[in-house]
Image: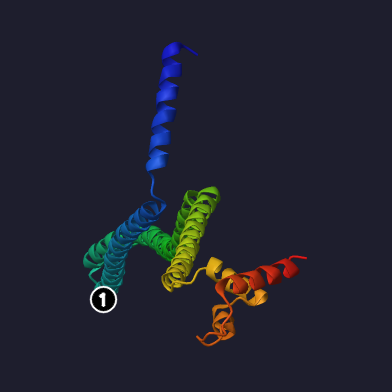
């Protein structure tokens, strides 16, 4: 095979591939039905013409037979009248019409056979068109189902499980961050409340040192209330300040062992 032949074969195969790729099954089916219906119309016209021609030939055949019979009767009538020459002429006319009838008989038989064949073909193509229409609807339904399945598969192919998982993980991370911020805000709010109470306690004027000092005084019996009660009335018999301090020192030594 030469180079030009191989190039031609490749070009032809590529053209056939393009034609096959461009074919739409639904359109091809519709066009096929249209072509079959057009053929059916032409076949019906051919059948009608053949039937009309057959009917015309049958009429001519019948007329020729009728004329042949009529001229035969005339020949017999002429013989009865003793006119042999007229009878011969009548028989000659009869023969002409008989030959015509015989010739027409062959055409009528042939035309009848042709009409019957056309009628059978007409019935056959009508049945094929009916079957083709049914098959076309079935194929169209299958084509549409296949296209729908293809679209679904394409959609499923575009939906990536990994990408969806990544989206969910990212959204979950955002939710966790939002919850963490909410918890932090709550804790900050509680700390602020504690700070407010601490401020109130500091503004009350009594600190923990003051509480401890008062407690120590109570343990030592040196609270301000007891010290006031221990003081005698302001008269000449009241002990001196030095004695009171000495007594407090003695009590402190006893407490300290």
Please state the horizontal and vertical placement of residue 109, each as a whole percent of the image.
40, 61
Judge by depth and name the residue closer to the eye, 67 or 183.
Answer: 183
- Taking the spot 61% from the left edge, 70% from the top edge, the residue there is 245
Judge by depth and name the residue closer to the eye, 170 or 56.
Answer: 170
Left or right of 61: which side holds 250? right
* Residue 257 in view in this figure: yes
Please state the horizontal and vertical placement of residue 194, each as a whole percent of the image.
48, 69
Q: Going by the picture, which residue comes out furthest to the front?
A: 236
- Residue 100 sits in which quadrant? bottom left
Judge by depth and name the residue closer to the eye, 73 or 42.
Answer: 42
- Taking the spot 51% from the left edge, 58% from the top edge, the residue there is 176
**Element class at badge 1:** helix
Circle 1 residues within 10 Å: few <14, some 14–19, many ≥20: some
- Taking the spot 43% from the left edge, 68% from the top edge, the residue there is 199
Residue at the spot of label 1? 77
Please state the horizontal and vertical placement of residue 117, each as a whole percent of the image.
43, 60
- Residue 42 sits in which quadrant? bottom left
Q: In which quarter of the image is the C terminus?
A: bottom right
């Amino acid at each position: 095979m030469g180079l030009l032949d191989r190039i031609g074969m490749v070009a032809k195969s590529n053209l056939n591939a393009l034609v096959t790729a461009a074919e739409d099954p639904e359109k091809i089916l519709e066009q096929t039905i249209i072509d079959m219906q057009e053929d059916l119309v032409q076949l019906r016209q051919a059948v009608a013409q053949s039937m009309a021609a057959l009917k015309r030939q049958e009429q001519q055949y019948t007329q020729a037979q009728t004329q042949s019979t009529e001229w035969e009767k005339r020949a017999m009538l002429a013989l009865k009248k003793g006119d042999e020459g007229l009878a011969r002429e009548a028989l000659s006319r009869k023969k002409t019409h008989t030959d015509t009838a015989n010739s027409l008989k062959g055409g009528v038989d042939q035309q009848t056979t042709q009409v019957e064949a056309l009628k059978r073909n007409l019935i056959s193509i009508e049945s094929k068109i009916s079957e083709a229409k049914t098959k076309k609807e079935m194929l169209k339904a299958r084509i549409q189902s296949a296209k729908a399945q293809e679209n679904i598969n394409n959609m499923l192919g575009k939906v990536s499980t990994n990408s969806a998982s990544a989206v969910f993980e990212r959204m979950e991370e955002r939710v966790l961050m939002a919850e963490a911020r909410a918890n932090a805000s709550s804790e900050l709010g509680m700390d602020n409340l504690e700070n407010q109470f601490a401020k109130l306690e500091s503004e009350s004027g009594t600190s923990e040192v003051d509480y401890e000092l008062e407690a120590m005084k109570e343990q030592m019996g040196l609270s301000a209330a007891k010290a006031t009660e221990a003081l005698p009335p302001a008269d000449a018999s009241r002990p001196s300040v030095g004695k009171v301090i000495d007594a407090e020192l003695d009590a402190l030594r006893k407490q300290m062992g």
